[in-house]
Image (spheres, rainbow, N blue to C red):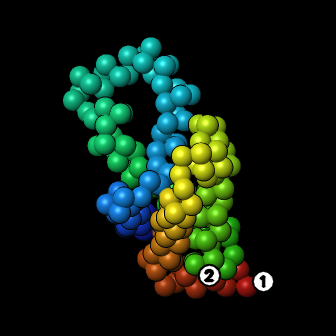
């Protein structure tokens, strides 16, 4: 259920972010991948992972195909985390749960990841307010849609059990 919800939500999120390029509007993108590259890129290179990766003919990390694949994989993993761990703990409607998850992850990105990259709060060093807002909206749509679709895809008996367990 969370896999299907995540696949649909990340597809829509990806389309929204790609749409920003056609406006044109610069939005925050790739922060986690950039940070991981800083933290482990050299170690992976020393281990020969890059050479091995290239020999397999796989997309290189600097390329669009790799970055898109990374974005999709992280999105699906976020949906799985929601469905397996967070959703059972959160109270409220699917909309409220998705919004809470969106705020939590947006804050982590805005307060930790982007500042660690030298991009300032929410990427404000390089992004204007329209780019920050557009990214926040696309980001929020992903998390709310993931939560709403996850709830929709739950079998009816499971939905009833979960809603009863949260009443008391």
Near-viewer residue (80 or 65): 65
Q: Which mark is residue 98?
A: none
Q: Is residue 18 above or below residue 153?
A: above
Q: Is residue 63 above or below residue 97?
A: above
Near-viewer residue (103 or 85): 103
- Badge 2 element: loop
Q: Farthest residue toward the right? A: 168
Expressed as whole percent of the image width and height from the top left, the position of residue 54 reads: 27, 25
Which of the image's four quarters has the C terminus?
bottom right
Near-viewer residue (65 or 135): 135
* Residue that appears at 39% across and 52% down: 72
Q: Earlier in the sequence, mark 2 or mark 1?
A: 2
Q: Is residue 159 above or below residue 97?
A: below
- Badge 1 element: loop
Q: Quadrant of residue 90?
A: bottom right
Expressed as whole percent of the image width and height from the top left, the position of residue 162 reads: 62, 79
Expressed as whole percent of the image width and height from the top left, the position of residue 135 reads: 50, 60
Which of the image's four quarters has the N terminus?
bottom left
Q: Which mark is residue 168?
A: 1
Expressed as whole percent of the image width and height from the top left, the position of residue 101 reads: 62, 64
Q: Which mark is residue 93?
A: 2
The residues tagged by marks 2 and 1 sit, at their Cα atoms, a distance apart of 15 Å
Q: Is residue 127 above or below residue 47?
A: below
User: Is residue 89 in view?
Assistant: yes
Q: Residues within 10 Å of mark 2 (few under 14, many from 20)?
A: few
97 displayed left or right of 77:
right
Q: Residues within 10 Å of mark 1 (few under 14, many from 20)?
A: few
* Residue that appears at 52% across and 63% down: 130
Residues at badges 2 and 1 in contact (C-beta under 8 Å)? no
* Residue that appears at 46% across and 45% down: 30
């Amino acid at each position: 259920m969370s896999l299907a919800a995540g696949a649909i939500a990340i597809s829509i999120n990806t389309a929204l972010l790609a749409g920003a390029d056609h406006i044109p509007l610069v939005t925050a993108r790739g922060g986690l991948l950039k940070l991981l590259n800083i933290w482990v890129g050299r170690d992976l290179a020393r281990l020969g992972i890059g050479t091995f990766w290239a020999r397999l003919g796989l997309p290189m990390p600097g390329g669009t195909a790799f970055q898109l694949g990374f974005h999709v994989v992280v999105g699906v993993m976020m949906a799985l985390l929601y469905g397996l761990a967070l959703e059972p703990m959160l109270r409220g409607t699917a909309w409220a749960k998705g919004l809470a998850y969106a705020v939590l992850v947006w804050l982590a990105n805005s307060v930790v990841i982007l500042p660690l990259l030298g991009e300032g709060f929410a990427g404000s060093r390089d992004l204007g307010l329209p780019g920050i807002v557009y990214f926040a909206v696309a980001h929020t749509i992903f998390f709310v849609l993931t939560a709403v679709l996850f709830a929709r895809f739950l079998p009816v008996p499971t939905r009833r059990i979960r809603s009863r367990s949260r009443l008391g």
